[in-house]
Image (tube, rainbow, N blue to C red):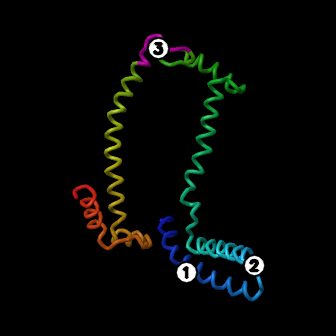
Amino acid sequence: AVIAKIEALQSEIAELAKRLRYEVSVRAKQVGWSEKNARFHYRKNLRRIVSELYVRDNCHPFKASLLIWVQIPMWVFLSLALRNMSVGLTDSARVSLSEFAAGGVLWFPDLTVPDSTWIMPISVGLINLIIVESMALYWLTSSCVGLGHNLLLRSPRFRQLCRIPPTQADSQTPYRDIASAFIGKYFK
């Protein structure tokens, strides 16, 4: 919804930028600004206007990428913690290593030595074979669900029901457009 709001604002931003360009050029002639100074004032005021529009419509572009910026540090810190624990760089990692040596389960009492019975490597290999087959099924279902979402989000009625603002790229006959594009690309 954030991306749709930003796209809907583009026409208003273009109109305001055109008006601002005129106002800055008039002001530059009145005050006697150089071309460089006029460009500076234009860019400064345009940034302010765009920021005010983002605040007004509650659609700052940073919101669309917020989840990524939360996940990246978590991934880095988890990777560093696992590395430090496996290499033994900290005192707590040395304590954890001794706990791994004494805290085995079932047929392996020591988690720091390889499995001599080969039960774990064989079971991991079998599980990976099953996972490969299930990954193909996952990819198929995920693609079908994604296609369904995309088709649903192209529906004008659904977009109106969910209060997604219309954009310039919207069509009144989206499914007919998709079908004709598909036929034109693959069958002609």
Indicate whether 171 appears above or below 27.
Answer: above
Q: Nearer the viewer, mark 3 or mark 2?
A: 2
Q: Local crowd at mark 3 within 10 Å, few (<14), some, or many (≥20)?
A: few
27 left or right, relative to 76: right
Residue 102 sits in quarter: top right
Residue 45 screen position, x and y as percent: 68, 76
Residue 33 screen position, x and y as percent: 76, 81
Q: In terms of sequence position, does the residue under pointer 1 or pointer 2 come before the other? A: 1
Indicate whether 9 appears above or below 75.
Answer: below
The residue tagged 1 is 15
Query: Which amino acid type is marked by label 3?
Result: Trp
View extreme (front): residue: 35
The residue tagged 2 is 34
Query: Which amino acid type is marked by label 2?
Result: Ser
Badges 3 and 2: C-beta atoms under 8 Å apart?
Answer: no
- Answer whether residue 21 is magenta in the image: no
Q: CA distance from mark 3 to mark 2?
A: 82 Å
The residue tagged 3 is 107
Q: Which residues are magenta?
A: 113-121
Q: Secondary structure at mark 1?
A: helix
Asked whether 187 or 139 is in front, the reply is 187
The residue shown at (62%, 24%) is: 86
Residue 159 screen position, x and y as percent: 38, 69
Q: In terms of sequence position, does the residue under pointer 3 or pointer 1 come before the other? A: 1
The residue shown at (64%, 34%) is: 80
The residue shown at (57%, 60%) is: 63
Q: Local crowd at mark 2 within 10 Å, few (<14), some, or many (≥20)?
A: few
Q: In terms of sequence position, does the residue under pointer 3 or pointer 2 come before the other? A: 2
Residue 13 sits in quarter: bottom right
Q: CA distance from mark 1 to mark 2?
A: 24 Å
Q: Nearer the viewer, mark 1 or mark 2?
A: 2
